[in-house]
Image (spheres, rainbow, N blue to C red):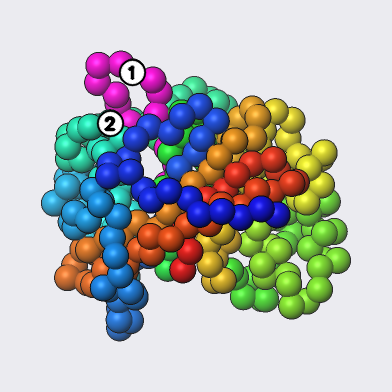
Amino acid sequence: MDTAHAPAPDPVPTRPAPGHVDVWLVRPPLPGRPPADHHAPRPPGLSTALRPPGLSAAELRRAASFARPADRAAYATAHTALRQLLGGYLDRPPSALTFVREPCPGCAGPHGRPAVVQAGGGPPLHFSLAHSRGLIAVAVAPRVIGVDVERLPSPETVEACARALHPGEQAELAAAPPGERRAHFGRLWTRKEAYLKALGTGLSRHPRTDYLGSDLRRRPARWAVLDLPAGPEHAAAIAVPGDRPDHVTVRWLPAELPYGEGAPGANPGSTVTRSPRSGSTITRSSR
């Protein structure tokens, strides 16, 4: 496994080239927890605070509908980050972005993958958004993409949810050492959700239908599903149709979080890892 230092982030996000994927990770505020790395350096061009005023009226109503303050803050942070990132890629004000739903692949109804309206044409820009307790992920690519992130579940949750997995995945999970089953389940589940999101069906397609275990030969044909580095408490994955991405860049996005909370910082150092198994290059921020 070869490692090397990656270049610093560009001053503003630039569209990923063909074969490339950008993944941005954000830590939402948690009540009672001091902000992490508040004084850490921030990538240039992305130091603007993430503030709820950039959200649409519908997004603000949705954020306000959550009973728990942590859930409200996580939703607002996730959608503010998404708007700021896509606004940077498309060179448009975040508040001016319009989101739509693509047709559902099952019934053609307007509840398929989310998409951003791109005024004036240009090459397509696809995205996917996911958040779990303590972490948000935004993936951006020039082709359809799905991303998922999950906080590692308790052993009891693993036991209860394992029956929803593909039989081959259940066998792999049962064979894993007890101390590794939470992480193994997290990898299985995030691969599955990323794939179903990219497919456009979400969990309307039963999780048991598709095998996303460790045997690459048994996974869905003409799809690439990759695990992502997301820290010790979470699992994350992306899925894209076609060949495996040549390069996946994972960055931590600094954010002045809404509702008066503090800001997790970003570490500018990066490491490039070449995976012989996947043939892809993953650049991840060091922490």
Q: Quadrant of the N terminus?
A: bottom right
Q: Which residue is mark 1?
A: 122
| Residue drawn at (22%, 56%) of the image | 47
Q: Quadrant of residue 181?
A: bottom right
What amino acid is at disc 2?
Answer: Leu
**Would residue 71 be seen by someone viewing this image from the given angle?**
no
Question: Magenta includes 191?
Answer: no
Please state the total of marks drawn on the protein image: 2
Tell me where residue 208 appears, x and y as whole percent.
72, 47
The x and y percentages for residue 152 are 58, 69
Helix, strand or loop status at disc 1: loop
From what the image shows, is residue 59 above or below residue 18? below
Question: Looking at the image, do the residues carrying marks 1 and 2 touch, with CB atoms under 8 Å apart?
Answer: yes
Indicate whether 267 appears above or below 116. below
Query: Which range of residues does the magenta coloring cover?
Result: 116-130
Identify which residue is drawn at 23% across, 48% down: 45
Question: Amino acid under label 1?
Answer: Gly
Tell me residue 271's x, y (percent).
Answer: 53, 57
Mark 1 Cα-neighbour bin, 10 Å: few <14, some 14–19, many ≥20 = few
7 or 68, nearer to the observer: 7
